[in-house]
Structure formats: C-alpha cells, structure tokens
Amino acid sequence: MSQANVADGSLLYSFDLFDTLIERDTVEPESIFHFVQRELVRAGSQLPQSLIDNWPTLRQKAEADARHVKRRISFLHDEERLEVSFDEIYQRIASSYDLNDEQIRQLQELEIAAEIAHCRPINKRVEYLCALKTQGFPTVIITDMYLPRGVIERILGKAAPSLVGVPIFISSELGYQKQTGSMYKHIYSLIGPSLRRWIHYGDNALADGETPRKYGIEGVTHQIVKFSDMERAIIHNAPPNLKCDAYEIAAMMRQHRIGLLDAACSETLERKYYGYAYVGSALVPYVYWCIQNALRQRTQVLYFIARDGHILKAIADEIILAHSYPLQTKYIFGSRATWRVAAFSDDAIDPEFFGSYGNFYAVQTYDELLKATLLSEEEFFEFCPIAAGLQATDRLDPALVQRVVELLKNSKDYKNRLLAIAKQRRRLAVKYFQQEIDFDKKIAFVEFWGTGYTQEAFTRILNTAADRDIGSCFYYVRSYYGNRGNVIRKNFIASNITYVPFEAIFSDIDYHSIKEYIESDDGSVTPKIVPKRSSAFPHFVEGATRFTRDLLRINKTSDALIRYLSEISFSYQVSVKNDQFICSVLGELKYDYSGYDTPRKYAPPFSRDFLQSVKQPNDLLGESMSFEISYARSSAENRQLYDEQAARFGWPKLSSAPVKPSFAVDPLAQQLRFERLPCTVRALGDLPVYLDVSLSEASLLPDESIAQGAQVNVLAVDWTSLGQPRLLTDLGYISADAALLELV
C-alpha cells in the first residue's frame, strides 16, 4: 500500500519501529558498529588502520556531524527536512578518509548485514498490530531512521514477516522527523480531515509522546529496559577485540533479568538474578578453565572440595555434559577443620595452627575461641586459666585472643592433647580418603581460593591414604602459596583482590562446615553433617547452571573472553558497594566468618542503637564484613550518625553512595498477575489513566479515568525501565497495584 493510499477512516493506529516492533538483540544501536569493526579486522581490510581501530566512535561522530550539517542547511533555507540519510552519513566519512565509492559500499554493506543479523521481533506488539489489521483498523509504521527503505523491508522480512506490506513512513526518505512534529503533520496531510482519533505507540518520550500529543495524537509511550550497571561494566571495560562478545553476554544477562519479572516477589527476583549474573559470570569461566586444563593434563577425575565445590561441581557437570568430555567429577566432604589437625605428625604440630590464618583466625567470641581450641571447656580452663573469666564477654578483644593463643602455643600439655586428637582424626580422614578417592586414576582437586595451607595438610593425609607420595594438584581462582615440590597449585587469575564475598555465597549452603568424620558400625566413614537453613543457595545453583548453559549456547568460551569475563565480574563485585543486587542479596547472607557455626549477616544496614553503642573501631568488625555495603544500605539518618561517630571515635571514613535501586523497584508481590492476556479487570477505586508507562503527570489524561467498579480491558503488561509493571488498556496505562484492581 502506498503512502497516499492510507485508509481514510476516522481512526488510525501508528507504531514506531525500532524498540517498539523490532529490537536489536544487543540492545543498543552502537553495538552494531562494533560488529562492523570486528568484521573489518577479520577480513584483513585494507582501509586505513585508524579508521578500523576507531570505527565505532567514528561512525557515531559521522552521524552527529551529518545531522548538525543538515540542521544548519535547513535553517539557512527555512526547510523542515532535518533527517539525514544513510548515504549522507557515509559521505562525511568518505570526505575525512578519502574513501572511494567501493570502499564506502563495503562499509555500508557490513553495517546493513549486522543490522539484519541482530534484529528480532518484539512479539507482543507485532501480534497487537496484526490483530488490529485483522479487525480492519488502518495501521502504519513511522520511524525516525537513517536506513533506506529497502534495508528496513529486509529487516522486517527477517524479524517480522507479518509486517511486510504495512505502510511505512521513513524519516530519511521523507526528510521529516517525529521529534519535530513534521512527520505527523505530513501524514495528517495525506489522510485529510476525516481522521477523528489517532493512537501512536513508541518508546521515545519526546518523539513518540510529547510531540504527537501537541497535535492531539494519543502518544502512548513505553520504555525499554536498559543494561544494568553490572551488565554495562562488562561492555564498557571490554577491550576492542572482545567488545562484541561483551555485548552479547550483557544482552543475555539482561534478557534473563527481564524474564525474571514473573517471579513471585522482588526478593526472589534479586536472588535468582544474583545467582545467574553475579555468581554465574564469576564462577563459570573459572570452572571452564579448570576443565580445559584438566583435559590437557589427561586428568580422569576432578574432585570438588566442600563447601565451595558444590556450585563449582554443578557448573562443571553442565559443561562436561554439553561437550561429552571424558572427565568424571566427585564431591569431597571436608574442611580446614577436618584436615589441618588430622595432618599433624605424631610428634609435631604445624606452626600454621597458631598462625594468622590458622585455627584461631577471625575468632571474636568465647564460644568461637573454645571451639578453636578443640577442647572441652574443662580442659580449656585447665590449660589456660585466664579463660575462666571470658564466658561473660560479648566480644573478645583481638589482643586478648592473641594472648590466649600464645599461652596455648607454649603449653606442652595442650600440645600433647592436640596430638592425641590429631591421631584419631587422622585415622578417620585417611579411611575416608581411601573410601572416596580412586588412586588408580589421574586425579586433581578444585577449590575456590585461599592461602594454600589447607592443601598442604590435605596432601599429607592423601599420601598416607595412598601409601605413597602422590602429591596433589589443586585448582584455585587464586592462592597465596605457589607450587611446593609435587604439591601443585594452578591459579586462574593473577590479582590482588580479595574473594571473601564469595565465601559468604558458598557458606549459604544448607549445612554447616564439616568439622569431623564419623565411623559407622559397618566400618564406613561419613562426614558429620549439621543441617542449617539456606536462604538463597538453591537460587545460586540454579542461576549459575543456567548461566553455564546460556554461555555455551551462544558459544562464548574463548580463553581470552572467559578470563576477561571472570576478572571484570570479580572486580565489579568487590569494588561497587551500592549495587542493588549486591546490597540486597550478599548483604543479607548469613556468613560464618570464623568457621565455628556462628553465622552473622554479611553486611546489614547500620542501626541507630548499634552506632550509639560502639566506641572502638574493632567493635565494628562483629557487625559487618563490609562497612561500605552496610553504609550504603543504611538510612540517611544513620549514615549521618555514622559520619559523626567516625569523626568522634576515629572509625574508618566511608564514602559509598546510598544503595541504587535499579530494577523491580516496586514490590512484585503487590502487583496484579495474569495467566493470559487480554483480560478484564475491575477498578476498586477511581483510577487515573496515563499515556506514558511511567505514569508521569505530564501524560495524565485529565478527561479519562476509570470509575470505581468499572471494568476495563487489559491488552498487555508493559514494564518501565526500572521493572515496574503497568497495564496497557484501550484508554492508556493504569497502575498494576493489586490493591486497586481485581480480575474479573
């Protein structure tokens, strides 16, 4: 149908094209320019190297330049034709780099190919437009776009064939723009005075909303969900050779986040997305690297060490299954508590037992101190008389803990008792290893991170169990110790960042750290498992394994890419303190920092009572593992109180901004849910109607409202960029608050 033959009925529906009917699978228009750059590099293009190296920026600047020139010329000649064409943009590039017609044609073809390859339909709006056509309503597509008609028709043919044949008004072809209003005036001039109502759908608040409303057009505007800060960091920090991959991974994460809006509540959404995007992006690359390295070493069995190994093994099993790798996996129960003491020799205690990262590491309370000694309370008092006065102390001074450690370290009787305990533990640990580990196969072990001290103890038990010096090969994200003889440590990342936040993730599993093994009547040895409540761990496992499958599906597993992805993920998670998902999920996890079954919230918001009760900086340590996250989560009043107390008592100065809500900012549990659409709802009170999905006052329809008790047809659920649901009706947008509506 030609533009002049638009139906002359009294009602017209028009739709924006990009981000309304179709979208780029990498979300942002500039992503296309990075795909062009990648193809130029792959093809070994003979174009100027500076053009290739700077293509994404150059292409954007050329478009801005062409638009500026167009505006100036239009102003001088008093014209309304402001839109630039595809050729005009490339003419600016040609003049700057002295390119010939063939070189320009090649560049344009690469961009067109990338646009077509990365377009996809937004099904609910395509289906809505088609339903309107079927009902006989006149529909048109209006786009402010530099691409020529032939390219747009090819894009529609690939992404939404059902829209081929719908009249399209293209700004670059006509010179008119939606944003200035000239496009709407032009279309109206073609239709004539018979038009009584015009409804336009689009995503640009100005071009699709404010401008058409000035002409009496009902500009109904939705929003697109942009990249989150985490997703944006993956894109922004990627080197040029990985930029396209970064876009595709970030888009994958964004798409998953949008899909989670069906979650029952915001808390569940946050945990699910954290497991997918935060846990997945950090750990999946690490495990993939472990597997590739193990295969090169012809390893036959990978043993994953509890409790960190639970998620890591789940990821590994997905990778091995997807590729049919000849590699087995197994989970080994244990911990530093089960192995370090068991590894003592008959007549010597490891010096590390009393060291900075030894058995008394992070002890803060009397109960933790008692458990760290491995003694009964009666024995503790016998070997360390000053301990008798510590039970009533809420939090032990670090200097006092160190004094107790020194007394025990110098007590011959205590050391003899430790050696007796070690002997019994060693017998059970050796038997457990003999029972669970296949020494006839080439084996390796997967940990997360640490000093590497526990591996030394583990290896001594392993050698005893194997009855030969077999050494050990451990994989780590990062370890402090390097290789020592046949005790091999393979490190994924060379970095000086701390990975403590991930310890809180692993420790959220549904059992406490393994402290000992138990021998059954039949002679078998099993770990003593003490169950505990897990708040989010199932979501972490589910999210990480889903991320694994998705990453394998889009085939983003080159060594350079997985190293980059893991490093930027770890870096972001340890440096950004006010991220919504970090604050809401990690901050709420119960973390047993000392390893003695006394979990505390990782980083709760500071309360007024706590801040007023604390005087010494050391007293803050028992409240939070991250002062900056706690500070970000605290109310404005308590942030101010912290600042005042910090200045008064010499506490650490904190600078993290308040937590930044960015998605599902309204409680999802309070929003109306639908099993199918369209459907009918009844208003429980008078409801205002808006033309913008944000429900902005500027888009309020003063003459339209839904009276209490009235029924209205819901066409679709649209979401704001912040993940807030809105109901699209025949009249416009209304709130989805379940307190205001009920299903009919």
Image (cartoon, rainbow, N blue to C red):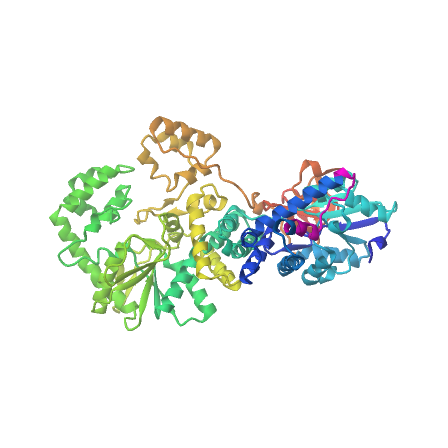
Q: Residue at x 68, y 42 (%)?
A: 68
Q: In the image, 294: left or right of 180?
A: left
Number of marks in picture: 0
Which portion, as a residue range, is magenta? 75-93
> Which residue is more in the foreground, 44 or 436?
44
- Quarter of image, res 318: bottom left
User: Looking at the picture, does residue 609 appear above or below residue 1?
Assistant: above
Residue 495 visible in the shown view? yes
Where residue 551 appears, as percent x and y from the top left, is 50, 60
The quadrant in which residue 151 appears is bottom right
Whether residue 707 is visible to the viewer of this picture, yes or no, is: no
Q: Is residue 325 magenta?
A: no
Please state the horizontal and vertical placement of residue 481, each as a whole percent of the image: 27, 54
Instruction: In the rendered view, tell whether residue 476 sits above or below residue 65.
Output: below
Single out the residue that lies furthest toward the left. 412
Which corner quadrant of the image does residue 740 belong to? Answer: top right
Viewer-nearest residue: 72 or 403: 72
> Is residue 81 rendered magenta in the image?
yes
Q: Is residue 470 above or below residue 265?
A: below
The one of 467 and 565 positioned closer to us in this rendering:
565
Where residue 629 appears, x then y in whole percent? 43, 40
Q: Position of residue 39 (x, y in %)?
A: 57, 60
- Figure quadrant of the N terminus: bottom right
Tell me if 709 is positioned left or right of 358 in this view.
right
Residue name at image x 54 percent, y 47 percent: 228
